[in-house]
Structures are given as C-alpha cells and as structure tokens.
Amino acid sequence: MSHMYNLAIIGAGPAGIATAVESYLQGIRDIVLLEKDQNHNSTIRKYYKDNKRVDKDWKGQKVELDGRIYFVDGTKETTLDFFDEILTNHSVELKTHTEVQSIKKRDGYFEVFVAGGSISAKYVVVTIGRMGKPNKPDYKIPLEIKKRVAFTLDSCVGDEKILVVGGGDSAIEYAVDLSTKNEVTICYRRESFRRANPTNQNDIANAIAHKEVEAMLGVDIDSLEDEDGRVRVIFSERESQTFDRVIYAIGGTTPSAFLANSGIHELDGKPVHNENYETNIKGLFVAGDITQESGGSIALGLNHGYAIACYIQKNN
Ligand SMILES: Cc1cc2nc3c(=O)[nH]c(=O)nc-3n(C[C@H](O)[C@H](O)[C@H](O)COP(=O)(O)OP(=O)(O)OC[C@H]3O[C@@H](n4cnc5c(N)ncnc54)[C@H](O)[C@@H]3O)c2cc1C
C-alpha cells in the first residue's frame, strides 16, 4: 500500500490551510494538502479583484478567532502572502495540480482518488468551497455571447458598458471597482443592498449618488439575447438594454456530485455534519464555505479548521 498519511485535506483555501496548520501546531504530523489548481487559494486568486480590501468580519459578521492563526484585515495581496508564509513556516506538504475525484472509506483508513492513482490517509477533511461552480442564471446564455458573460473580472478591459448582476458584497465591490473605467449598472432583484456590509453599502450609495454606477433595484432578468455580438438583457417589467459585458456575482453552489460520490450525506444544500464538523462517515470532516449555504468567510473557515484539529488531536 502507498504511504499512509495521518491527515489528508482536500482544497487549499483558508479552511484547508487552517486545518493543516492548526493540526501541525497541535503536534499532528504527516499532513498532506491536496489542491487542484496550480497554487493555494484559487478562490481568492480568481474572484478577488487586484488590491481588493479583505475584511476579517466579512459581510458584517463579527468572528472571534479561536485558533492560533492571527488573521487581520488586509488586501488580496497581503492575504495571499499571509497564507504563503504560514504554509511555509509549518512544513505542510502541499500537492498542487491534484484534483480529488472522490473518497472511499476502507478498513480503518480512507482512500482519496486523484487522477491516475490514490492517496491513503487516516483522517480526511474536505474544504473545497463553493466557488468551483459559481451560481449561474437559470435562463440560457446564447452561444454567440458566452464570451461576454462572466463570473469574474478577468475579461474586463475598460471603456465598456457593463451590467453587474447581484447585490451582495462581491457584486458591489465589482461594480464600484469597474466604475472607475467603465459605464456600470448594477441589477439586483431585491429593493436594497441591506445584505452587504456597512462599508460596501456606503461605497455603493456614494457611487450611485455621484452617478458613477446606475442601480436597478427590485429588477429581475428574464433572458439574454445576442445583438450583433453584444448582450441584450431582457428585464422583467423594464425596457431591455444592451451591454458590452454582463458579470454575475451571485455566489457559488454546493459540490453535490463530489459529496454523493464520497458517500457524504447532504441536507438542504449542505453536507450533514456534527458539532465537530464530522460527516456521517467517521473520520471524514467538512470545513469552510462548503458547510454554509451562503455567507462563509475566511475567519469562519479558520475556526472550523481549528475545531477539527482539536478534535482529531483528542481522538487520535
Ligand atoms: C468576490 C469575493 C470576495 C470575498 N471577500 C471576502 C472578504 O473580504 N473577507 C472574507 O472573509 N471573505 C471573503 N469572501 C469569502 C471567502 O473568500 C470564502 O469564505 C473563503 O474563501 C472560503 O474558504 P474555503 O477554504 O472554504 O474555500 P475556498 O476558498 O473556495 O477554497 C477551496 C479550495 O479548494 C480547491 N478545490 C476545489 N475542488 C477541489 C478538488 N476536487 N480537489 C482539490 N482541490 C479542490 C479550490 O481550487 C480552492 O483552492 C469573498 C468571496 C468572494 C467570491
């Protein structure tokens, strides 16, 4: 049999890194962190705009940190550096380009399946987040305009007429940031931005007051159409408009297929787990955004990692 790790963690986002580092600090050794992307924290790298302000109390949720990882407000760049540093300082083995397909419980250990083989471990923690599959609208996006409809800011070039769809913190941050170089409208199905944190509520109110962003509140979208390569947006009960680009910032989805293939039960869009984040399968845990229907945060993920590390240390 291949090497038996004590602990295999799937997904190197904040929750995965915290589980690894807190476990190391509790004296647990032989930990492997498996990440499908080329580096840790692919959600932060892909979805956060450059220089984004990173709030510890994201979405206005105050979180007291339980563990030994001292995380504070910063930017996208300082946050990534911070995670780089704690990974290096705690000798955690990070295997990148390693996408886990499923997990099977064997006799007293787990087999974690990756392309072309498997890894064995005594305990497994799944921290794969929800942004592997961002939420998509339920209407069809015509093929001709697919390149003009996105879920990150990667494709934005400046001097465009852009529609941002959503009304949470991410949508507001995208809209305000894009408005420095583009003509931006934000479309949200609710009547106000009350779910966003106070700073973002303030930023969007200012941007609207100064006509840097146009707001369409209480508005739904019925469909998208191709108009000579641009995106015609058909709003319900409003005249349609044409944009160069549409950016959706409407959260992520539960990786249900992954959970089902690994035998982890799901209820109401979340994996079932107890107060120690242990699933219906003993020794197999979940942490971070995957445990939240919406509204996860870096600090919450760090606390989940600490709780799991304490539990494993006590029961090892
Ligand atoms: C635009 C935006 C702005 C945000 N701003 C803030 C903020 O300011 N403050 C804050 O606290 N929170 C913020 N959040 C939320 C925060 O990013 C998440 O709560 C946090 O990243 C969740 O951590 P996680 O470890 O659970 O999952 P993730 O960060 O999503 O990490 C999951 C990791 O697992 C990897 N993975 C997925 N599937 C597999 C697989 N099968 N095999 C191996 N690896 C896999 C992914 O590549 C990824 O690296 C923001 C979110 C978004 C989208």
Image (cartoon, grey):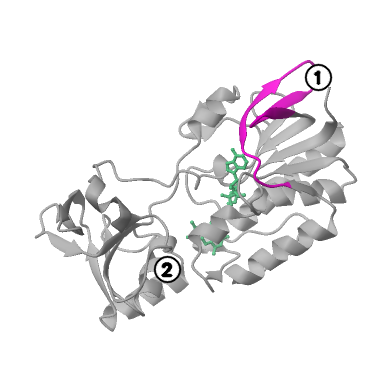
**On the rendered image, what quadrant is the C terminus found in?**
top right
Relative to 50, does residue 308 appear above or below in the rendering? above
What's the amino acid at mark 2? Answer: Glu
The structure residue drawn at horizontal position 38% and vertical position 52%, both measured from the top left corner, is 250
Magenta stretch: give its range. Answer: 95-118
The structure residue drawn at horizontal position 42% and vertical position 68%, both measured from the top left corner, is 173
Point out residue 269 in the picture as x, y percentages from the top left corner. 46, 34
Residue 291 position by quadrant: top right
Q: Secondary structure at mark 2?
A: helix
> Distance from label 1 to label 2 (Cα)?
47 Å
> Which label number is shown at residue 173?
2
The structure residue drawn at horizontal position 57% and vertical position 64%, both measured from the top left corner, is 57
Pick the front one: 69 or 232: 232
| Residue 100 on the magenta span | yes
Q: Is residue 9 left or right of residue 88?
A: left
Q: Is residue 244 left or right of residue 180?
A: left
The structure residue drawn at horizontal position 77% and vertical position 31%, both measured from the top left corner, is 123
| Residue 6 on the magenta span | no
> Which label number is shown at residue 310?
none
The answer to whether the beta carbon of the residue marked 2 is less than 8 Å from any atom of ligand 1 is: yes
Point out residue 15 in the picture as x, y percentages from the top left corner. 66, 49
Tag 1 residue: 108
Point out residue 209 in the picture as x, y percentages from the top left corner. 28, 81
What's the amino acid at mark 1? Answer: Gly
Sequence order check: which comes first, mark 1 or mark 2?
1
Relative to 95, does residue 150 appear above or below in the rendering? below
Pick the front one: 147 or 85: 147
